[in-house]
Amino acid sequence: MRIEVTVPNLPESVNDATLLDWHKQPGDPVTKADNLVDLETEKVVLEVPVPENGILQEIRRHKGDVVVSGEVLAVIETEARPQEAGPAPRAEAPAPRAEAPAPRAEAPDALSPAVRRLLLEHGLDPAKIPARGPDGRLTKQDVLDYLERRQPPTQEAPPAAARGTAIPPEQATRPAPARGPERRVPMSRLRARIAERLLEAQRTTATLTTFNEVNLQKVFELRQHYRAKFEQTHKVKLGFMSFFVKATVAALQRFPIVNASIDGDQIVYHDYYDIGIAVSTERGLVVPVLRDADKLGFAEIEQAIAAFSQKARDGKLSYEELTGGTFTITNGGIFGSMLSTPILNPPQSAILGMHAIKERPVVEEGQIVIRPMIYLALSYDHRLIDGREAVSCLLAIKESLEDPARLLLGI
């Protein structure tokens, strides 16, 4: 029986996906629930599992194709046995043509825009370039290979000014010499979406940033004293992020406008605290959301963040984990950043930027001492949040971190 493998239903906010990679090829046996193909959306990579055991008979869409919900990706024959089902033609590039086919004249309309642009820039005759594309078509790579094989002239003519003559037209249009190898790769859906959202944030918000520095000496002492017992009890390391999440939530409870957002001509106050934690991956920045962070203890926060980090590295974050959020925390300090101005994550109205923790001399009770210090940056939408509220909110975060007992006592 032939079974069609289709694109799963995509979330409401996602219109389409890009086919990222096939894990099987036509003729290969497939096993139910194995990952057959990866689809990349603007947020996550979706795995499409094999619906039934069988043989992959046909691939309908190929790497790089844009697909939508319900579209047929492949066909599986469930009753065929591997030894009986001859491999179908593989969805690979055709066998290479002869290195130097006879010159031919190719209609300009048959050439791609990229090929036409290269021919025009270099003044080339397409009939003189060997074509190795499908159906004998001239491809961009054919032109680039031809340019690379061309030998430069052995001697350059003297400058026109020295000869007292005009520059010949063929020299006037000669392109500048190549500066070195270049590579062009398509932008991933996630990277394109990040770029779109960052530009949107710059265009649609009135962003300002306020800064402060925090003495983390007492946080260090608390972690040092209880770290081993904490890890033994909760099976997770006691990091710094749980302190920052708890301090942030306490500050947002005091200044609810910083946790709010704008919807048209209305202010939406969120009486819950879903904190986005920015995580860097090879594909780009993702922001999984820590739901109801005000109801979580230190151990639960650390466990959730550790799980987010592992899922992000493996590309296993779900849409639900990346959706929503009322406030975001980003930590450029893990890469060595000392100071930055984080960009808002719309429709949120504020974001906290953490930076590298460095030992610096500070004055305490008239004495110069060395303390672990960190710069914090709070970017906010000035359309909604006034400077007084933003500065006061960041100061509240500072006070909680410099005296973490406040977090336990709720003061």
Image (spheres, rainbow, N blue to C red):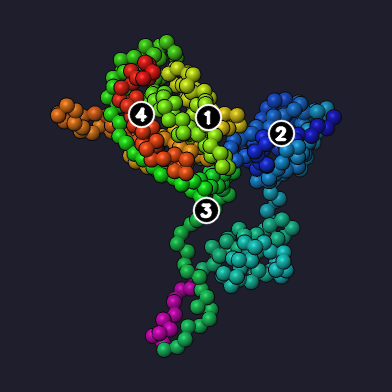
Amino acid on which disc 1 is placed: His
Mark 3 or 2: in front is 2
SS at badge 3: loop
> Which residue position holds label 1?
270
SS at badge 4: helix
Amino acid on which disc 3 is placed: Arg
> Which residue position holds label 2?
8
- Give me the C-alpha separation between circle 4 and circle 3: 48 Å
> Quick one: quadrant of the C terminus?
top left
- Give me the C-alpha separation between circle 2 and circle 1: 32 Å
User: Does the rendering let one see residue 195?
Assistant: no
- Marked residue nearer the N-terminal end (3 or 1): 3
Where are the magenta residues, as a range? 152-163
Image quadrant where residue 146 sits:
bottom right
Q: Residue at x 28, y 22 (%)?
A: 218
Where's residue 304, x and y in %? 50, 22
- Give me the C-alpha separation between circle 1 and circle 4: 19 Å
> Which residue position holds label 4?
396
Where's residue 379, x and y in %? 42, 40
